Image (tube, rainbow, N blue to C red):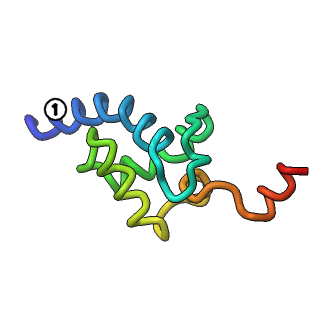
Amino acid sequence: MMLKVKLSIKLVIGTGLLTMAVLTSHSRVSSAESGTPEQQAACTPDVLTLCLFDIPNEERIVACLNRKIAQLSPACRAVIEGPSPDKKERAKS
């Protein structure tokens, strides 16, 4: 029972920090630094399943997501990797 309580507390505290960690850090592409609600929603499930024990350490969460990039959901991977070169070109036009 105590373990469940500790994990619940860790999740509550970590979820708020998760947003900053994932979306304000310098991941593979700096475009991930603007933390929109959509970007937050895209990565929260991945952090909770793949990087749970790194919460609330922001640097460790980002490192974990980058290390496990192949396992990320498509939505979170898009946030971490940033827009594709094709999308960058269209944005410049």
Residue 21, x across and y down, in percent:
40, 40
Outermost residue to the bottom: 70
Foreground residue among 15 and 57: 57
Assign the N terminus to one quadrant of the image: top left
Outermost residue to the left: 2
Residue 84, x across and y down, in percent:
71, 62
Q: Which residue is mark 1?
A: 5
Residue 71, x across and y down, in percent:
46, 67
Foreground residue among 76 and 48: 76
In the image: residue 76, left or right of residue 54: right
Foreground residue among 58 and 4: 58
Number of dots carrying numbers = 1
Which residue sits at x=38%, y=29%? Answer: 16
In the image: residue 59, left or right of residue 8: right
Residue type at mark 1: give it: Val
In the image: residue 17, left or right of residue 81: left
Which residue sits at x=61%, y=47%? Answer: 31
How crowded pointer 1 is (Cα within 10 Å; few <14, some 14-19, many 20+) is rated as few
Q: Is residue 3 above or below residue 68?
A: above
Which residue sits at x=47%, y=65%? Answer: 69
Q: Secondary structure at mark 1?
A: helix
Outermost residue to the right: 93
Which residue sits at x=45%, y=44%? Answer: 25
In the image: residue 20, left or right of residue 73: left
